[in-house]
């Protein structure tokens, strides 16, 4: 025994000791990884983010709230766009407030006549009708999403996975 | 009869020892008493020194575990049935309303009492080491902070379970605060929710956290907390007592010499903790400490039972992802955070930092880290250990109290002075009529 230890510099006992500890650590780490990884879903049974909202004719002038999808469809004569109702601060659903009298506000150096605003009930953030945040803790404007016409039946299709710029308009 | 008496005595003698010798034996012979020292100083038993807040927290935790068990048999952690099952507990199940009220009130009280316990330990300088060997009170202070955080998470995961409007929107706000964390925020949110939306996965995750992982964590930390109290020589007021005795230049107190053959290297070991005059300043743990613990248990349970009879347990409308209530308020103990995330969005030119990051993560994070490392920054002398409002710690106590008052003030503002759209209202101002959902 002694000669073996001297020859290799490591005794059989300490080699097995290290092997045992190493095996235990590897086992625990592997199980831990499997445990955590199992909690990261591979399949989500959530609603698709791209959905049909109805034919353009169904939407009156102004903003229509689709409560199931937390999104506003805004119609301005023959143009359409979609503004998210999810507050950019902490994700509550903003409420549309129709102003009694239109007011003129400057958004990005441009003067615009406002007829509605969006207010958040959770922490009091406020947005202009185009989604620009102007008061409260909201850090950025409400998101806008792509609106298309479905080629097969002419319905407005909103894609909540595809944010677009605030100037985006679909002309029908 | 004689045999019965004998059995009864066998079962109970440790709780009412007939002699000092029996009292010393009882903590060794009874499993439930084994974590107590044979003797405790009279000062540690005082209600005025500690207000027994730690014991009350532990009792409340016990009440929560016990009342949680029947609730687990009755509650169904499914999105379709959770709300209905809580409604059944409240209105259909015999005594269901009472068990739920006990559980809820004990949870509210536990948050308050754990917080007060932390305030007490700070103001009395009880996280500081005294003169005895091998003390590590700062470590116990950190364990205590972890216990407080676990208490907050237990309440947070608990009030999701009824799946009512309060639950749904609290989780919306809470998990969005988590996602404001830099780099890993979105991943944490995804893992917490088990997806991108608050659905079945989320409810089940919070349920398992609430019923198993967090209570197990608290139980483990609680054992460690108690073990450390023993290792640190009891409450901090004992150190104060032994210092006083040294100052009075009393003749050395009787110390004990134990023979620990085969356990330690030398033949004997001198026990240094016996710095206080045992005859004058201590009593046996059984029955003096046990009696007070039982009294505190009785008082705590009595108060919760009374409150459960008097205070109705609210249940809001069923969770509705389409409609955010207006105003949407977290429970009172999180309203200071809700107020913070509202007030801390910073705009520097075009650059904006979300209040969720500053008020929701950075400010509470810095406060918690500061609290945790404070014992190592506190250089006050050993005379300030276990002394309420010690002159040597006046400045830090004032700053600490200032922060505590600020948190309380924000809580009051959030609770009483915020109305629809989180606008500020004085209590005497009426809230405007809000149209139904839209």
Image: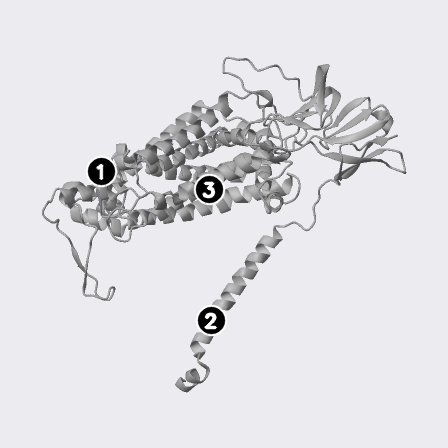
Q: CA distance from mark 3 to mark 1?
A: 30 Å
Looking at the rendered image, the quarter that the N terminus of chain B falls into is top left
Q: Residue furthest right?
A: A152
Which tag, 3 or 1, sits closer to the chain's start? Answer: 1
Q: CA distance from mark 2 to mark 3?
A: 36 Å
What residue appears at the point 53 percent right and 40 percent down from the top-left corner?
Answer: B73
Q: Residue furthest bottom?
A: A3
Classify mark 1: helix, strand or loop: helix
| Chain of the residue under label 2 | A
Disc 1: which residue? B43
> Dividing the picture into quarters, in which one does residue A80 lie?
top right
What residue appears at the point 62 percent right and 29 percent down from the top-left corner?
Answer: B318
Q: Which mark is residue A54?
A: none
Q: Which mark is residue B150?
A: 3
Q: How is the image coloured?
A: one colour
The picture places residue B158, in percent across and down from the top left corner, at 52, 37
What residue appears at the point 66 percent right and 39 percent down from the top-left corner?
Answer: B197
Considering depth in this image, is B262 or A115 the residue closer to the camera? A115
Determine whether, in the image, residue A147 is placed left or right of residue B336: right
Q: Do the residues marked 2 and 3 share a common chain?
A: no
Q: CA distance from mark 1 to mark 2?
A: 51 Å
Q: Do the residues marked 3 and 1 share a common chain?
A: yes
| Chain of the residue under label 1 | B
Disc 2: which residue? A18
Looking at the rendered image, the quarter that the C terminus of chain B falls into is top right
Residue B135's place in the image compared with A17, above or below, is above
Residue B187's place in the image compared with B345, above or below, is below
Determine whether, in the image, residue B222 is placed left or right of residue B268: right
Q: Do the residues marked 1 and 2 share a common chain?
A: no
Mark 2 neighbour density, 10 Å: few (under 14) some (14–19) many (20 or more): few
Classify mark 3: helix, strand or loop: helix
């Amino acid at each position: 025994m002694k000669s073996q230890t001297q020859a290799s510099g490591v005794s059989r006992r300490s080699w097995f000791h290290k092997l045992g500890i190493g095996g235990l650590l590897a086992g625990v780490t592997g199980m831990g990884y499997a445990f955590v990884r199992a909690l990261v879903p591979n399949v989500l049974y959530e609603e698709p983010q791209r959905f049909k909202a109805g034919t353009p004719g169904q939407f009156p002038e102004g903003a229509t709230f689709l409560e199931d999808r937390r999104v506003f469809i805004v119609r301005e004569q023959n143009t359409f766009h979609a503004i998210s109702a999810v507050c950019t601060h902490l994700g509550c659903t903003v409420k549309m407030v129709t102003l009694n009298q239109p007011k003129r506000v400057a958004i990005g150096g441009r003067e615009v006549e406002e007829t509605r605003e969006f207010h958040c009930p959770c922490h009091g953030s406020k947005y202009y009708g185009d989604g620009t945040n102007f008061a409260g803790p909201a850090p950025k404007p409400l998101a806008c999403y792509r609106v298309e016409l479905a080629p097969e039946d002419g319905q407005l299709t909103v894609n909540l996975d595809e944010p677009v710029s605030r100037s985006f308009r679909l002309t029908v | 009869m004689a045999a019965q008496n004998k059995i009864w005595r066998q079962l109970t003698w440790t709780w009412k020892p007939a002699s000092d010798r029996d009292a010393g034996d009882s903590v060794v012979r009874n499993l439930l008493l084994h974590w107590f020292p044979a003797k405790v100083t009279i000062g540690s038993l005082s209600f005025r020194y500690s207000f027994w807040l730690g014991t009350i927290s532990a009792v409340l935790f016990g009440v929560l575990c016990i009342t949680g068990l029947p609730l687990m048999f009755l509650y169904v952690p499914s999105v379709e049935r959770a709300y209905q099952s809580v409604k059944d507990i409240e209105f259909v199940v015999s005594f269901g309303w009472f068990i739920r009220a006990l559980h809820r009130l004990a949870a509210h009280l536990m948050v308050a009492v754990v917080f007060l316990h932390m305030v007490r330990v700070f103001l009395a300088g009880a996280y500081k080491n005294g003169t005895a060997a091998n003390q590590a009170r700062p470590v116990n202070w950190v364990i205590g902070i972890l216990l407080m955080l676990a208490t907050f998470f237990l309440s947070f995961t608990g009030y999701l379970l009824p799946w009512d409007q309060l639950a749904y929107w609290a989780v919306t706000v809470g998990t969005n605060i988590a996602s404001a964390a830099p780099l890993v925020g979105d991943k944490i949110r995804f893992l917490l929710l088990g997806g991108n939306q608050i659905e079945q996965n989320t409810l089940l995750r919070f349920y398992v956290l609430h019923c198993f992982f967090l209570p197990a964590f608290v139980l483990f930390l609680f054992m460690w907390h108690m073990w450390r109290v023993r290792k640190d020589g009891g409450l901090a007021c004992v150190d104060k007592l032994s210092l006083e005795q040294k100052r009075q230049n009393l003749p050395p107190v009787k110390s004990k010499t134990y023979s620990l053959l085969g356990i330690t290297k030398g033949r004997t070991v001198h026990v240094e903790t016996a710095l206080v005059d045992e005859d004058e300043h201590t009593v046996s743990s059984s029955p003096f400490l046990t009696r007070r613990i039982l009294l505190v248990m009785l008082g705590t349970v009595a108060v919760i039972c009374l409150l459960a009879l008097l205070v109705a347990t609210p249940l809001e409308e069923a969770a509705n992802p389409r409609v955010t209530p207006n105003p949407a308020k977290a429970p009172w103990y999180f309203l200071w955070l809700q107020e913070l995330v509202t007030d801390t969005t910073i705009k520097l030119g075009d650059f904006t930092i979300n209040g969720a990051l500053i008020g929701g993560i950075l400010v509470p994070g810095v406060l918690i880290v500061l609290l945790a490392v404070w014992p190592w920054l506190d250089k006050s002398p050993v005379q300030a250990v276990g002394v309420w409002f010690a002159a040597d710690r006046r400045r830090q106590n004032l700053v600490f109290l200032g922060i505590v008052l600020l948190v309380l003030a924000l809580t009051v503002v959030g609770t009483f002075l915020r109305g629809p759209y989180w606008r500020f209202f004085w209590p005497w101002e009426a809230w405007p009529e809000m149209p139904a959902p839209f």
